[in-house]
Amino acid sequence: MQSRLLIVDDDSEMREALGNIFSGEGHACELASDAAAALKVVDARTFDAVICDVVMDGMSGLELLDRLRRTHPALPFVVITGKGGLLEAVDAMKRGAFEYVVKPCDADNLRRIVAEAIENRRHPSDALRVASPTPAARERWSLIGSGPAMRALQTTIDFVARSSAPVLIAGETGVGKELVARAIHARSERRDRAFVAMNTSAVPQELLEGELFGHVRGGFTGAVQARRGLLTEADGGTLLLDEIGDMSFGLQAKLLRVLQFGDVRPVGSDHVHHVDVRILASTHRDLPALVKEGRFREDLYFRLNVLPVLVPPLRDRREDIPALAAYFLAEACRRAPTSPVRSIGRDALAVLSRSSWPGNVRELASCIERAVVFGVDEMIDCDHLEFSPDAAEPQAPLPWPTPEGAPWTIRRLNRAYTDWVLAESAGNKELAAQTLGIDLSTLYRWQRTQKD
């Protein structure tokens, strides 16, 4: 079946070039010189995907995306952004864009993205199918999900991977911070060099310096032979320092010198050598709060927080739970090949999607692993699911509050109603935004301002 594409760009040469690329692939292409013309065309004809530049005279590509998300929510929207357009790309993904490309466009990459968009448009139910993960999913370090929050995270990772500057990865326990770190390394120019990960909270603080910096023979009691240290082992590559918030204050000062100058001095040695290591740090702790309490060095915090990456909790990306469940089911079946379990029932999948998951993705994986290992039927149903007490029940919808005392301000009423709609939508921000009649970026902005 011939696909119909709408190409929107106020640059006539770029518009014609894109039209030639996809016409040559057998697609029917409609060209629009601005967003206003695109809106008229979309109202008159049906399209399989939209390819649109972000920066245009008049209405921008992001404004067009917002308009089409309200009127044609299932229409895939591919964004084209200029070099350095990290904020634009992330914003577009949060607003619901299918994918983004950066100028100058790689034609093969753009063809692949548009093909995926068309396939997703024609077979939307495929995202709910419980099946083995694709090789591409494994290559992306199991960062499963295509919802707005996950697409925004993937976009951030792509941009961060271009640099060698330090990265601070923040997020709750179990969200997959190490997977994000591995994805950054895998997409960087250091991908062919070592990736070394260390949980700083798992090593006694008195031994941590030797683990990181290495030591010479006799450098301390019990040092019967020299050791290189993880910073040296990761030379030329990437070192992940997990749970950096638990590192001792004294060792933080020595790490700061590594970040500033690349200097490493093994324990017990008088010699300093230089390393070229990209430092990624992760934590579930509130580092700014630790800085205020005097438990984390402010200068180290600012040195690490050059490129911040926030990994969203599972409750903020419930739309990804079916795909994650499919992935974990396949992995659990691989580890327990004699289990009869092969699928997850629709009702069980609905329960998984509604549950609160305080332990995030890690807890979801454990729940499915138990269902597979102890399963006696081919299909997992609701009775086979075992939750932690906090995850067993979804967060109860908030009753619509009735004003008490003095009349409410508009700000308070807006905050209460937004919270109520989010609760009624089981935390699904896309659904909540549709119910509220606003775009997703506006909902994110409301939540940020309400916290201030």
Image (cartoon, helix red, strand yellow):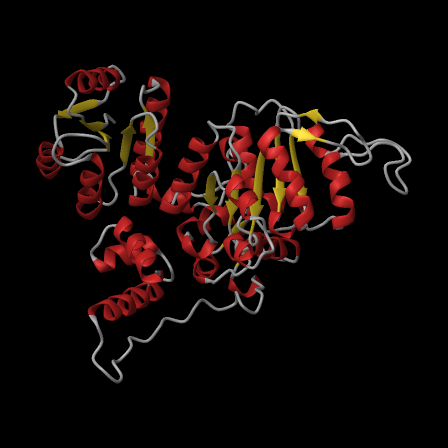
Residue 204, x across and y down, in percent: 76, 50
In the depicted structure, whether residue 330 falls above or below residue 373:
above
Q: Is residue 249 visible?
A: yes
Image-quadrant location for residue 77 = top left
Quadrant for the C terminus in the image: bottom left
Question: Which quarter of the figure has residue 76?
Answer: top left
Is residue 142 visible in this depiction of the protein?
A: no
Q: How many marks?
A: 0
- Tell me if 242 is positioned left or right of 406 in this view: right
Left or right placement of residue 132 versus residue 102 in this view? right
Judge whether 367 appears above or below 90 on screen. below
**Foreground of the two, 124 or 306:** 306
- Point 26% across, 85% down: residue: 405
Q: Is residue 200 left or right of residue 440?
A: right
Query: Which x, y percent locates residue 429?
Result: 33, 55
Task: Give the camera-side residue of 189 and 230.
Answer: 230
- Work out whether residue 51 or residue 172 is closer to the camera in this orientation and state it: 172
In which quadrant is the N terminus drawn?
top left
What x and y, as percent, mark residue 71? Answer: 17, 46
- Identify the residue at horizontal 36%, vertical 25% (top origin): 112
Q: Position of residue 166 (x, y in %)?
A: 53, 35
Q: Residue furthest front?
A: 270
